[in-house]
Image (cartoon, rainbow, N blue to C red):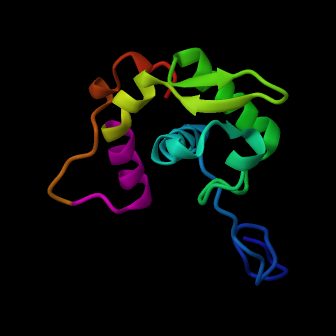
């Protein structure tokens, strides 16, 4: 505990507590946004940075996460002046599972239902 101000985390009193999410949460949130708004067309990195829930992520980190999503086949990169991204067919097939995991993260998961088991992750378990 910090003797100067009595705060256990070393922050001064009144300092904002920042909430950072793991890369897996950010990846699933990006994919959910791309699937839910697919009629808006391919998305640039700048546009994806302003999604509710991941606004605190750095641009290079989002690019890195999108690169891993492209490698795993969940997202397609659309070439052009600047690279844009859109959900692939595989990503769209995985949407119900993604929605369930995000509801579990956000605490909106129904108590009767069980969270997705690691066995249901399938071939994407090495990514998550």
Q: Quadrant of residue 45?
A: top right
Residue at 33% in and 19% down:
122
* Residue 124 falls left or right of residue 37: left
Q: Which residues are magenta?
A: 97-110
Q: Residue at x 39, y 15 (%)?
A: 123
Residue 41 drawn at (x, y percent): 60, 40
Where is residue 7 shown, x and y percent of the image? 72, 77
Say if 4 sits above or below 59 in the image.
Answer: below
Taking depth in this image into account, of 128 and 63 the one nearest to the observer is 63
Q: Is residue 73 left or right of residue 19?
A: left
Above-or-below relation of 5 to 37? below
Is residue 103 visible in the rendered image? The answer is: yes
User: Is residue 93 a member of the stretch shown in magenta?
Assistant: no
Magenta includes 108?
yes
Can you say whether 7 is above or below 40 in the image? Answer: below
Q: Give the main secondary structure, helix, strand or loop, of the magenta stretch.
A: helix
Q: Position of residue 14 (x, y in %)?
A: 76, 84
Q: Is residue 25 visible?
A: no
């Amino acid at each position: 505990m910090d003797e100067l101000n009595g705060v256990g985390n070393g922050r001064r009193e009144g300092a904002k507590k920042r909430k950072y999410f793991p890369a897996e949460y950010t990846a699933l949130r990006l994919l959910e946004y791309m699937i839910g708004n697919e009629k808006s067309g391919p998305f640039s990195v700048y546009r994806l940075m302003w999604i509710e829930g991941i606004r605190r992520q750095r641009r290079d980190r989002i690019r890195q996460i999108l690169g891993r999503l492209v490698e795993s086949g969940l997202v397609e990169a659309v070439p052009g002046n600047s690279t844009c991204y859109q959900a692939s067919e595989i990503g769209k097939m995985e949407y119900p599972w993604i929605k369930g995991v995000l509801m579990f993260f956000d605490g909106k998961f129904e108590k009767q239902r069980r969270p997705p088991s690691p066995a249901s992750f399938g071939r994407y378990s090495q990514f998550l």
